[in-house]
Amino acid sequence: MPSLASLFALAAPLMVLGAPLKRQANAADLLVLKFADVLENFENQFYQQALQKFQPSDFTAAGFVDAQVPIQQFQAIQSDEASHATILESTIQSLGDSPISGCNFDFGSALNDVASMAPVARVVENLGVGAYLGAAHLITDPALLTAAGSILTVEARHQTILNVLSNGVSIPQAFDIALLPNEVLAVAGAFISGCDTGITANQPLTLTNTGSVGPGTTLTFSSPAINGSTDGLFCQMLVGGMPTSIPFPFDQCVVPDGIEGPVAIFVTSDMQPLNNNVVERASQAVVAGPTMAFIDTQKQLLSQLALAASNSSGDNSSNDSSSTTTISPAQATSIISSASAASATDGATATATDSGASATPTGGAVSVNSSSDPAASGTNSAPAPAESDTTVVQSPGTRNIATGTTSNGAITVIGWDDLQGQDQQQQSN
C-alpha cells in the first residue's frame, strides 16, 4: 500500500500547477523551490539522525517527564519534513528542472546529546518559518505561493511545539521574523556542504555567551568577518512585530527588557536600524549574521507537562510529579489516616488549612492533588466509620470538609464533590 507521502508526491504537480494547463516556470520561482527543498532535507536529516541516535533514556536524562512526549513530536515533525521535500522535488521536476543534489548534512556537536539537540531543533524550526516567510515576496506564481503558504503554516506549528519542549513561551510574539535566503544560510550553512544552492550566504555569526541569556545580558560574538578592532561595528536585534531592529554599539550589545522569544541578531557597519520588512530591508551594511537567540523570561504551565525540570520552578511547585484524582470516601479516609499516622510518627499532628470554602459537603468523593508519596496511593484502604449525611467533622478518619495541605505535605485536598449522592440518584432513576 502506498504511503501518504507517496500519494501526495504523485498529486503534487496537480495540486500546485492545476492540470491540464502547462505553465512555464519562472527562474526566481525555481530558485526558491530548490532552496526550500534543501532546507526541508536539512530538517528531515536533522530529525532522522537524532531519532536514530538517541534512546528513550537519553530524553528522560535530559529532563523530560516521559520520553515519548518529545519522541512522538520529533517523529511527527520528521515525517512532515520528508513529505514537504517529496512534494517540492516532484513540483520542481514537473516544471522541467531538477532538485539540487549532493548535499551533505553534518550536525556535529548539535547531536552530542538531547540537551544539545533540543535547542538546535528550536532554531531549525524558527529558520523554517523565517525562510518561507522571507521568500514569499520572491515567488511570482500565485499557485506556488499558495502551496508554499500551506507548508509555512505547518512549520509554524512545529515551531510552537519546539518552544514548549524548550521550556519557552509557546507563542512568544504576535508576529514572526522573516529571513532572506542569504540570511537563512548564515545559520544553516554551517551544517550543509557538498552542494551549490545558488545563493551567497551572509557571513556566519556565533553567540559566544555561556549559560542563559536574558534581559541585562551583554552579548558577545565571533565571526570570520570580525577581525581585530570592533570600532565602528554595531549589533542589531530584530524581533517579530517591531518595525526595525534595535541597534547597539558592538561592545554594548545588552539584551533590553521586554523581549520574549526568538531574536535575530546581526552585526552591521553602521547604526542604521534594519527594516523588519524583508522587501525593504537594506542589507549592504550587514557584516555578519544573523544568529538566533531565544530570550525566555516567562514560564508557562504547558511546559510542565513535558519537562521535569520546569516543575521545580515557581513558588508553588514541587520536585515530585503530581496529578489530580477523584477518589472514593473510603480511599480519602485511608489517605488522611495514613498521613495522620505518618505525622504522628514525626511527633506532629496532621492538619489541613482552610482555604475559605464555606459550602457544607453532602458527601460522596473528594478531589485531591496527590503527590508521589506512597502514603497517597490509597491501596491500603480501611472501611470508613459509620456516618450520616449530616455528619460534619474535621478530624482524620471521618468525613472531612477541610481543604489545604497536610502538615507533612503528603496530600493536598482541593475540593469536595457529591459523587456518591449522584450515584444514588442515578440508581433510584
Image (tube, rainbow, N blue to C red):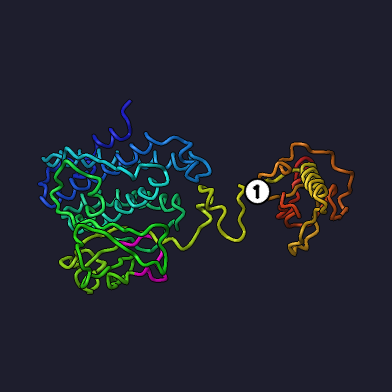
**108, above or below 156, in the image:** above
Front residue of 117/169: it is 117
> Is residue 166 visible to us here?
yes
Residue topped by disc 1: 324
**Extent of the magenta region:** 254-264
Residue 77: x percent and y percent?
37, 42
- Along the line of sight, the residue nearer the viewer: 371 or 248: 248
Q: Quadrant of the N terminus?
A: top left
Q: Secondary structure at mark 1?
A: strand
The quarter holding residue 89 reads: top left
- Expressed as whole percent of the image width and height from the top left, the position of residue 101 reads 16, 38
Task: Please state the horizontal and vertical placement of residue 217, each as a whole percent of the image.
Answer: 39, 66
Residue in the foreground of this view, choosing between 46 and 400: 46
Quarter of the picture containing the C terminus is: top right
Identify which residue is drawn at 62% across, 59% down. Answer: 316
Q: Is residue 340 magenta?
A: no
Residue 260 counted in the magenta span = yes
Q: Is residue 47 left or right of residue 316?
A: left
Q: Residue 359: give x, y in percent of width and height.
A: 78, 61
- Label 1 neighbourhood size at 10 Å, few (<14), some (14-19), many (20+)? few
**Res 18 → quadrant:** top left
Asked if 213 appears above or below 30 in the picture, the reply is below
Question: Which of the two residues, 32 or 150, is positioned nearer the viewer here?
Answer: 32
Residue shown at 89%/44% (left/top)? 386
The residue shown at (45%, 49%) is 165
